[in-house]
Image (spheres, rainbow, N blue to C red):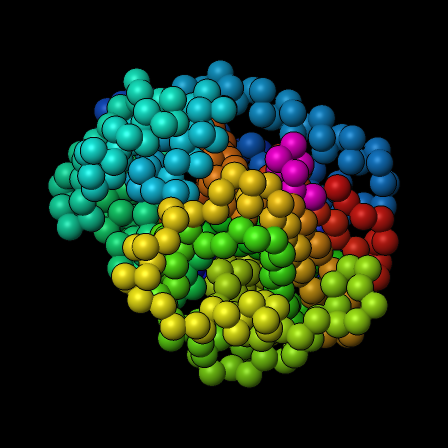
Amino acid sequence: MARSERRRPVDPAGVRLAGAHGRDCIRENIHTANLSPSSRGRRSRMIWRRSRIGRLATSPYGEIVGELVSHLARQHSSSNQEIHVQIAIYGASGYQGKLVIAELAHRAIDMRLVGRNATRLREAAVTSGMVDAEQRVADTDDHDALVAAFRGCDAVINCAGPFTSAGPAVVRAAIAAGCHYVDTAGEQFYIKAVFDTFADEAERAGVTVVPATNDGCVPGDLIAHLLAERVQPVEEITVSHFVVGSAGLSRGSLRSALDTIDALKNGGLGYDDGDWRTGIPARHTSVTLPGAEHPTEVVKCPLSEVVTIPRHVPVRHVESLIDAAVGARLGTPITPEIIDSLPEGPTDENRRTQRFTYLIDAVGRDGRRARGVVQGRDTYGSTAVIAAEAARRLVADGAEPGVLAPAQAFDPISFLTSLAPHGISWTVTGPDIPTALH
């Protein structure tokens, strides 16, 4: 199947057309030859339970639909707790990795801690209260060791940046071990490289790879799919990120920024007329936040959603923006020595007081507009929640093998609803259906 055929199409009435994600279907014995013996039994009958609640939730029935969606999400979650799952965390001793450990422990999901340093892994296990968790040491330059570290697990969550330099080796090893794969990357060129490089390999192995399961890309990508149903055919989608609070970046995030400094300075990739390219001028220089009297100045920033949205939404132009003041700070020179001297990451208090607002604005070719808003707190904690939920769903529900965008792998309404208990809210408003969805 060609990559372009993986999109879930939208018909003129705004209803998702039938396909693997639009109907219940059972696929048996999918590519199990390359899987480990412990994984074959769990995957020999992969059940894809793609409900139609996304179609219901875009109807104007307000609270009734909201209650139905919440009920179905709770029912879905409780039914999956009967399935034994083991997830490997690569980069488990890092700042983001330890937050993922805490999230999997909260969900009572069995985990395996994998990293490059045995001492740091043991310390992470102790500080996280997971001293009994399996621990494996494997570096990204040792493919066989990585494969052995992942083999027998159902999925891998990769938290070890910089992803541009270290990520491909982990993706390759996860596929070779027969594991589904997600990561917490936000590096735009790396994410595109995962789609370009590993799609056929993952499909042959019968596993699903979903990069960029972070606080911004997953909700933004899922909401973009819902917006497309309202204003298609779509002329443009603009994604804007705003983060306030005293929480800074972790050392890992700073190293990733240093690894991709040129992209940060020039705005990275945009999507225009069927292709991703650098140097595409931004169409917008300001954005008005919900409830604000005046617009906020913005600049281009290489966000993940630019790579994922066009894979399932037929759209002419996609660009990503951030607050201009934040963008100016990202260009501040920093050295590896300075990064090493900084704290590992934001304190718990700083994370609690941090707030984010992500806007997804869609414009149809006839001028109709629709907007999605995602709001929450604690970008690193939210990323841990989203990565854990994504990995769990790939194991419990299955998805098409290959490299997929979030909206190709997960039902948008169901996934977004699952984030509400973690303080992440979302609304979608548009010209045709004014009722907000929660």
Q: Is residue 82 shown left or right of residue 189?
A: right
* Quarter of the rendering containing residue 287: bottom right
Q: Is residue 286 visible?
A: yes
Segment colored magenta: 419-425
Q: Is residue 394 visible?
A: no
Residue 301: image location, x then y, percent: 52, 70
User: Which residue occupies the foreground of this view, 438 or 375?
Assistant: 375
Report the quarter where the C terminus lies. Answer: top right
Residue 324: image location, x then y, percent: 60, 73
At a point 68% along the width and 28% down the height, the residue shown is 72
Task: Give the total number of marks visible in the rendering.
Answer: 0
Q: Is residue 76 shown left or right of residue 124?
A: right
At a point 38% along the width and 47% down the height, the residue shown is 344
At a point 52% along the width and 39% down the height, the residue shown is 348
Residue 425: image location, x then y, percent: 69, 43
Residue 44: image location, x then y, percent: 36, 27
**Which residue in the rendered view is the most extreme toward the front?**
341
At a point 47% along the width and 83% down the height, the residue shown is 279
Report the quarter where the N terminus lies. Answer: bottom left
Magenta run includes residue 303 = no
User: Which residue occupies the foreground of this view, 260 or 224?
Assistant: 260
Q: Is residue 438 above or below residue 323?
A: above
Q: Is residue 374 above or below residue 286?
A: above
